[in-house]
Amino acid sequence: MKRALPLVVFVALGLSAGCAVKGGGLKTPDDLPAGGGVMSTGGAAASGGALDMGDGSGGVSGNDGEPVTSGGADSDVAPRSGGSSGSDALAVADGASGSGGSSGSDAIAGADVVLSSGGSSGNDAGTIDAPQSGGSSGSDAEAVDASQSGGSSGNDASPGADLASDGVGTSGRDAGLGANDGASSDRASGNDAGFDAGPNWQLIWSDEFNEPNLTGAATSNWNVVTWEPNTVNGEQQKYTARVQNIFHDGQGHLVLRGLNTPWTNNGTTYQYTSGRLHGKFQFSFGRVEVRAKLPAGKGSFPAILLMGTGANWPQSGEIGMMEQWGQDKSSLYCSTYSGSSGDINQKVTFPNAITDFHVYALEWYSDHIVFFIDDVQVAQSSFDTTSPFYTGEFYIVLDVAIGGTMGGTIGDASAFPMDMMLDYVRVYSQS
């Protein structure tokens, strides 16, 4: 299918193509005074958003209708519900955390996708659980679980091994696609095109988070949000611009940290604080990658989102690249919100999200969006030309919420700090 070329608006550019995996121990800002280290975004609110000066830090928030008023409820943002489904959806059985599963290509929706164990995908494909062995699969064919070796699977293509730590494979849709997040494996991916920064994908924006230790988010790339508690979904955190909540660790990571440490600002004491960033770069279509490690504490609700610049939600559109609801740290959700029948809320069983870094990605075309974790396709959503996913521009949101509708019951002191560590954010266009 012919794909539309990307429409790109350069609001802020921070170009870097480095792909090295960053390691090392985490340095924390715990020795800073509770009210110190305040950073200022130094910029105006994006696209009509209002300023919330509640913490005195000059934090900027809101892109085109994002709620920013102190303590106000957000009438445009409704709690999200799961189980949306697309047409001709093939659902994988819920709760199959230890066995292979299969998924279809037509608007996967609502049911579990098992990513932590062997599983493969294809049209009308059967599955055979054969750990330790290679195999192949495709449309109207059997799919083999190659959990420890190279293999192939997919739609009209040869795809790759499932999370093989040292394997090399290929996967994709109508294209060669590379091995998954293997420490020693070559890696390429694509959808109707090859990836690995090849001729069909071009890096157009990134933040590699290579800033000095205990510095805040780069204000050239991000607006820092300072919402009050209960602004959306009954969430309990106060978002701040303090380096206690948003900071670089000096080893190539940005940390969004949720804290259960009372903080008083302008006469108001907040029990929970955390960090939220809205990207200044806006774009349509392309590939987005975020390499991240998620918080383990119960009650945390981390998210990697693309938000539309329209005034009202959900008609403005939202793409949930990754949302992990607070009581189940063995799964996460990939979702689309637009108020149309093609929206999905796909549960993915993936307990490794809190133990290591993984690459959460999507490929956004003119009629569908494909979701990946470590280059394994886990969900797909379709849309038509009336959708905000076709007509709108979007920006990236990174946050760690605490409690509320999706976060649920907040854990005790041992659940804190709630850290989402970010290794990089990259946006590609299709050339």
Image (cartoon, helix red, strand yellow):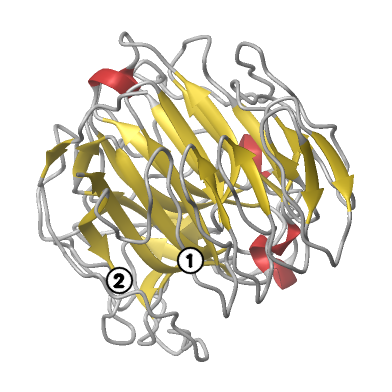
378 with respect to 278 (left or right): right
Residue 133 % position (x, y): 83, 64
Front position in the image: 97 or 188 = 188
Q: Which residue was labeled with disc 2?
A: 208
Taking the spot 66% from the left edge, 52% from the top edge, the residue there is 152
Front position in the image: 40 or 395 = 395
Q: Is residue 164 above or below residue 370?
A: below
Which residue type carries mark 1? Arg
Taking the spot 35% from the left edge, 46% from the top edge, the residue there is 287
Which residue type carries mark 2? Glu
What is the spatial separation of the Cα atoms under label 1 and label 2, in whole angstroms?
Answer: 19 Å
233 with respect to 197 (left or right): right
Taking the spot 31% from the left edge, 11% from the top edge, the residue there is 385
Front position in the image: 237 or 110 = 110
Residue 362 % position (x, y): 44, 43
Q: Secondary structure at mark 2?
A: loop
Q: Is residue 185 above or below residue 237?
A: below
Q: Which residue was labeled with disc 1?
A: 187
Q: Is residue 210 above or below residue 177?
A: below
From the viewer's perspective, is the residue at label 1 or at label 2 nearer?
1
Q: Tell me, yes or no, if residue 73 can be seen here.
A: no
Q: Secondary structure at mark 1?
A: loop
Which quadrant, please, contains the N terminus? top left
**Marks 1 and 2, the one that precedes in the sequence:** 1
357 with respect to 355 (left or right): left
Front position in the image: 146 or 367 = 146
Give the tally of numbered discs. Answer: 2
